[in-house]
Image (cartoon, grey):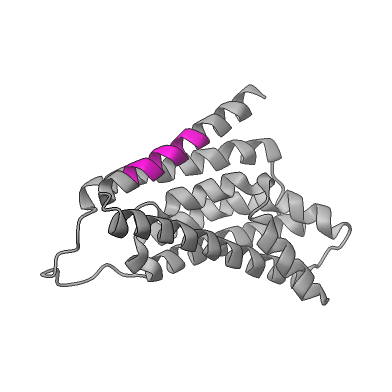
Amino acid sequence: MSVFQTYLQLGFYHIFNLRAHDHIVFLLALCAPYVLRDWRRVVALVTSFTIGHSLTLALATMGVVQYSPKLIELLIPVTILLTCLLNTTEMGRTGERLPTRRRPDPIVLAWPNLVAAVFGLIHGLGFSSYLRELLGRQSRPVLELLAFNVGVELGQLLIVGVILLVGFVLLRIFGAARRDWLLFVTGAAAGIATVLLLEQLMS
């Protein structure tokens, strides 16, 4: 197996690792306002998050950026809680989009994508500790960084795909209200993030 394939698999499987459960919760909160037909927006959103965490992951792994792991572990649940707070603004907009709307919301240059990219900067520092353990003394792991980030992106897309499919089943097949789905997912993510934050504050 090539180096690229090895690190691609490591990135893909790391996102499902228990050590990365906070990132999964963040993805859950990030995708809560969307349904399956919004998949293009979700891909743009997740890719924006990947761009953000890829930047700081590379800088931290190569020793360009120094940071406090304790602070980052504290900030990650904060990003989840802030995302949940932003989701509350969507509570009144979860009905069908009006056909009379003149201009659709942009997909790429959208405010949620910018927020996801900024929060990704923090999550990338959280990923870097694990990647540094894998790389050892390598100082310029360009190929490894690229492969790892691609693997993480693929893993994230799979996770959000599952979230959207579950939402589709509940909304379209079981007739759940979209607002209730948003409230449930956001509440679950906020609850887990609160526990993570308290654990960090008490440790």
Residue 145 image point, x, y percent: 72, 67
Q: Is residue 28 left or right of residue 139?
A: left
Give the magenta range. Answer: 182-192
Q: Main secondary structure of the magenta part?
A: helix
Quarter of the figure with residue 76? top right
Furthest residue to the front? 174
**Which quadrant would residue 86 be assigned to in this image?**
top left
Q: Is residue 73 above or below residue 49?
A: above
Q: Residue at x 33, y 47 (%)?
A: 182
Describe residue 113's horizontal placement relative to residue 106 as left or right. Answer: right
Q: Is residue 109 visible?
A: no
Q: Height in image: 120 above or below 74?
A: below
Q: Locate residue 79, reporting x and y percent.
A: 49, 43
The quarter of the picture where the N terminus appears is: bottom right
Up-down: is 172 above or below 76?
below
**Above or below: residue 38 compared with residue 178:** below
Question: Residue placed at 48% from the left, 43% from the top?
Answer: 80
Q: Residue at x 70, y 65 (%)?
A: 148
